[in-house]
């Protein structure tokens, strides 16, 4: 580890190579909107930062990042994991609720991933990245997620007779195996044990690029000490998870049973780096327990999703997913069930709080993780779960990812910058498997790049600008302050007002307008009263709120141009699924505060556009 003064860095050879630095870059002005009355220019800063070096920098310590790190180490390269939360317990993976796994590891047919991806192209409402899905599915066979999970100490789900739920064999009707009971903290322990350098409680601020445009590392802040850090590597993998914490505040938490760590940091970094994003409007939902209040948005209580859809009832105590029972080959997909749920709510057959009922009869005989719900309710809350429990829709995952990815390597358009995550598979529920598959592919590609390249130089001016802006959020003393926590809640509520699962043009445009106003008027007034750098949660809120605004506007821009209902995107002004016009991905990009967006028609390598138009079920919310 080497401690370097930014000014000393500038005095060195980097300045000779880059030319004279501008006075503005050296002044360290706070990026607080440029309004002099709200703080003006801050004092000149000299950010002494720690530099950590590894062959590959992985940002995110969930299943995507952990799998990437495993592969990097297996390839003989060094890896540093930068994790915003507590290692093994952060993000969606860190909930550690016994995740479900899907796998092709027991299927001996090495060509089956192609068949699998082609079939899921229809089950994913036609918009999945076919080549990416086939590549990650092939990686599942290689990784063997279920066997690996057991080897790492996880006790996967077993039937009452003691046999593994997966049966150690592919299911004859699907060619895949399913299991539950995977705990990512076990992976985290093993990855650290085999040599990963872990830096948790460390907030990655932005991607660093070298003079040739390739990724050279990330700038970050140690949230415990408040010290600036630079992580320098030959390749960077962004594996930070979703942006579901954008979904509005109900007084207890966001309308999400995912983690408060999921604030879209990686998506915002991609967008600031100039990359276009794909399908940001898709925010997938499950139905989770609403009463008693302590169970809201948590994995302790009862829920209903696609595998147990038959437990869902409307407010008239009528089932509404009969078509899935009657024809599972056509309708057994996540998008269809989400739209069926929202149809009941939109058409006035929802419960008091805008949800559905779950029938808990026979719950103790289930082989899913909701089975212990009755026992948990009694043990934790001394609450006897009734036959019918009110559930409300909650966000659990988002689909946004860089638009252009090499499916075999997960590399973005920026050389040396890779994506790993479950986002592309939110339509079909294979999120953990996608996390592991993309982590495996990106880890191999990043390790290969590291083996054949030199570690690029760090752009000191870029580092300085990032730290000036980030520390400026802490140090600013605006004339009309807004607490960082308050601003974050305002962002969440502005997003939810127009981007709830039932949307229309007026509401979506309202979200865009309000988030744009918050960015223009309120973000420069953000205030962190405690100026301590050491473990300052409100400073973290300020950093996260900035990312959430960017990602929220991007998601709303994508929602505005998809004038139909598809996946979890339910438009009350366009209630039908429109295959003729919208077998397409949304594409959004921001540059110099100017947004561009378009629809890109899909004509995949496995299933043609015409076949998708004809074959994707058109079940809307009307």
Image: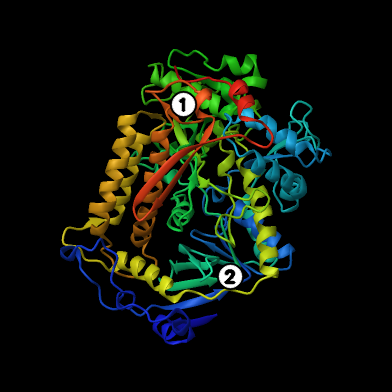
Secondary structure type for disc 2:
loop
Q: Name the image quarter holding the N terminus.
A: bottom right
Mark linked to residue 233: 2
State the colouring used for the structure image. Answer: rainbow
Labels 1 & 2 near each other (Cβ < 8 A): no
Q: Name the image quarter holding the C terminus.
A: top left
Is residue 307 placed above or below 82 in the rendered structure?
above
Residue 415 at least partly seen: yes
Count of picture labels = 2
Secondary structure type for disc 1:
loop
Q: Left or right: 526 with respect to 54?
A: left
Residue 581 is situated, as x and y percent measured from the top left of the image, at 50, 26
Q: Left or right: 72 with respect to 239?
A: right
What's the distance in space between the residues labelled 1 and 2, CA to CA? 42 Å
Which image quadrant is residue 15 in?
A: bottom left
As drawn, the residue found furthest toward the right would be: 108
Residue 112 is situated, as x and y percent measured from the top left of the image, at 78, 36
Is residue 55 placed above or below 169 in the rendered structure?
below
Decide: few, some or many residues near mark 2? Use Cα within 10 Å; few <14, some 14-19, many ≥20.
Answer: many
Which image quadrant is residue 366 in?
A: top right
Decide: few, some or many residues near mark 1? Use Cα within 10 Å; few <14, some 14-19, many ≥20.
Answer: many
Mark linked to residue 565: 1
Residue 391 is situated, as x and y percent measured from the top left of the image, at 45, 28
Is residue 420 placed above or below 28 in the rendered structure?
above
Residue 145 at least partly seen: no
| Mark 1 or mark 2: whose residue is earlier in sequence | 2
Q: Nearer the viewer, residue 380 or 425?
A: 425
């Amino acid at each position: 580890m080497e401690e370097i003064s930014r000014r000393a860095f500038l005095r060195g050879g980097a300045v000779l190579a880059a030319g004279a630095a501008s006075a503005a870059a050296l002044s360290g002005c706070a990026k607080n909107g440029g309004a002099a009355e709200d703080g003006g220019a801050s004092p000149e800063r000299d950010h002494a930062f720690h530099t950590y070096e590894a062959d590959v920098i992985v940002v995110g310590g969930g299943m995507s990042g952990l799998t990437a790190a495993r592969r990097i180490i297996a390839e003989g390269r060094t890896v540093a994991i930068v994790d915003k939360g507590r290692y093994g317990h952060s993000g969606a993976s860190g909930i550690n609720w016994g995740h479900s796994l899907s796998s092709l590891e027991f299927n001996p047919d090495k060509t089956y991933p192609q068949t699998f991806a082609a079939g899921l192209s229809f089950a994913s409402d036609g918009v999945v990245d076919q080549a990416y899905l086939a590549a990650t599915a092939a990686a599942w066979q290689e990784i063997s997620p279920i066997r690996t999970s057991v080897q790492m100490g996880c006790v996967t789900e077993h039937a009452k007779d003691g046999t593994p739920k997966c049966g150690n064999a592919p299911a004859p009707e699907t060619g895949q195996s399913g299991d539950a009971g995977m705990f990512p903290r076990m992976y985290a322990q093993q990855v650290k044990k085999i040599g990963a350098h872990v830096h948790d409680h460390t907030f990655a601020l932005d991607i660093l690029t070298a003079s040739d445009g390739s990724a050279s590392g990330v700038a970050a802040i140690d949230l415990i000490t408040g010290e600036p850090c630079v992580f320098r590597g030959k390749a960077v993998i962004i594996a930070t998870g979703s942006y579901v914490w954008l979904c509005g505040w109900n007084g207890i938490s966001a309308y999400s049973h995912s983690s408060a760590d999921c604030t879209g940091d990686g998506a915002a970094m991609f967008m600031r780096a100039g990359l276009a994003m794909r399908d940001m409007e898709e925010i997938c939902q499950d139905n989770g327990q609403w009463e008693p209040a302590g169970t809201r948005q948590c994995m302790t209580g009862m829920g209903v999703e696609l595998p147990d859809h038959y437990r869902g009832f409307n407010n008239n105590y009528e089932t509404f997913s009969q078509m899935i029972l009657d024809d599972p080959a056509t309708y057994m997909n996540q998008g269809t069930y989400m739209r069926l749920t929202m149809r009941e709510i939109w058409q006035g057959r929802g419960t008091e709080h805008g949800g559905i009922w779950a029938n808990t009869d026979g719950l103790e005989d289930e082989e899913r993780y909701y089975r212990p719900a009755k026992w948990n309710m009694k043990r934790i809350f001394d609450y006897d779960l009734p036959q019918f429990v009110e559930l409300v829709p909650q966000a659990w995952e988002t689909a946004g990812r860089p638009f252009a990815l090499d499916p075999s390597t997960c590399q973005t358009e920026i050389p040396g910058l890779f994506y790993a995550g479950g986002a592309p598979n939110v339509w079909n529920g294979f999120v953990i498997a996608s996390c592991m598959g993309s982590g495996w592919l990106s880890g191999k590609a990043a390790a290969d790049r590291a083996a054949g390249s030199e570690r690029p130089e760090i752009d000191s001016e870029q580092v300085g600008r990032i730290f000036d802006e980030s520390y400026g959020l802490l140090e600013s003393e605006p004339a009309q302050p807004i607490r960082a926590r308050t601003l974050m809640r305002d962002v969440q509520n502005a997003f939810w007002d127009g981007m709830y699962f039932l949307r229309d043009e007026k509401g979506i445009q309202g979200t865009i307008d309000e988030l744009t106003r918050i960015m223009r008027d309120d973000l420069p007034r953000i205030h962190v009263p405690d100026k301590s750098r050491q473990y300052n949660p409100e400073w973290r809120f300020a950093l996260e709120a900035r990312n959430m605004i960017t990602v929220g506007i991007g998601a709303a821009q994508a929602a505005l141009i998809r004038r139909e209902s598809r996946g979890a995107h339910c438009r009350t002004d366009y209630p039908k699924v429109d295959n003729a016009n919208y077998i397409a991905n949304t594409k959004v990009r921001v540059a110099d505060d100017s947004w561009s967006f378009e629809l890109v028609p899909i004509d995949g390598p496995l299933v043609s556009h015409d076949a998708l138009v004809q074959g994707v079920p058109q079940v809307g919310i009307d």
